[in-house]
Image (cartoon, rainbow, N blue to C red):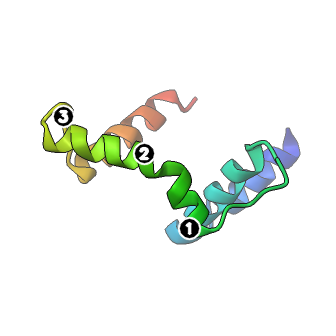
Amino acid sequence: MAALKTVLEQALQLSDDERGELIGQLLRSLEPDDGEDLTADEWLAAWSGELDQRAREVREGAVELIDGDEALAGVRRSITARRP
C-alpha cells in the first residue's frame, strides 16, 4: 500500500490534462486484452448503433439532459463524499 500512496501523491501533482490521460490509460489497462485494438473507424462502426439510439432518445425527449458543469459538480460531490 505504501507504493500506492506514493503513486497517488505523485499523480496528484500532475496537471488536470495529465491526470485525465493517466486515468484513461489506467481504465484501458483494466479492459480485457483480446489482442485487438480498434481504429477510430472500427470503434465508430462498433458503437454506431448505440450512438444512434442515444441520439434518438434525446430528440424524442425520452431522457433528461444534464448540463455538463452540473454533471461534473455532482461527480465531484460523490468523490468527495467517499474520501476518508
Kindly tell me whether residue 81 is visible in this rendering. yes
| Amino acid beneath label 1 | Asp
> In the rendered view, does 8 fall on the left or right side of 14?
right
What residue is rendered at 55% in x and 51% in y? 46
| Amino acid beneath label 2 | Gly
Nearer the viewer's eye, disc 3 or disc 1?
1
| Residue tagged 1 | 41
**Is 32 drawn above or below residue 28 in the view shown?**
above
Q: Quadrant of the C terminus?
A: top right
| Residue tagged 3 | 64
* N-term mark: 3 or 2: 2
Where is residue 65 shown, x and y percent of the image?
20, 41
| Residue tagged 2 | 49
For the residue carrying disc 1, how many other residues have a C-alpha within 10 Å: few (<14), some (14-19), or many (20+)? few
| Amino acid beneath label 3 | Glu
Where is residue 3 shown, x and y percent of the image?
87, 48
* N-term mark: 2 or 1: 1
Tag 2, which secondary structure? Answer: helix
What residue is rendered at 12% in x and 35% in y? 61
For the residue carrying disc 3, how many other residues have a C-alpha within 10 Å: few (<14), some (14-19), or many (20+)? few
Kindly tell me whether residue 19 is visible in this rendering. no
Q: Quadrant of residue 7?
A: bottom right
Question: Real-space Cα distance between discs 3 and 2?
Answer: 20 Å
What residue is rendered at 86% in x and 43% in y? 2
Nearer the viewer's eye, disc 3 or disc 2?
2
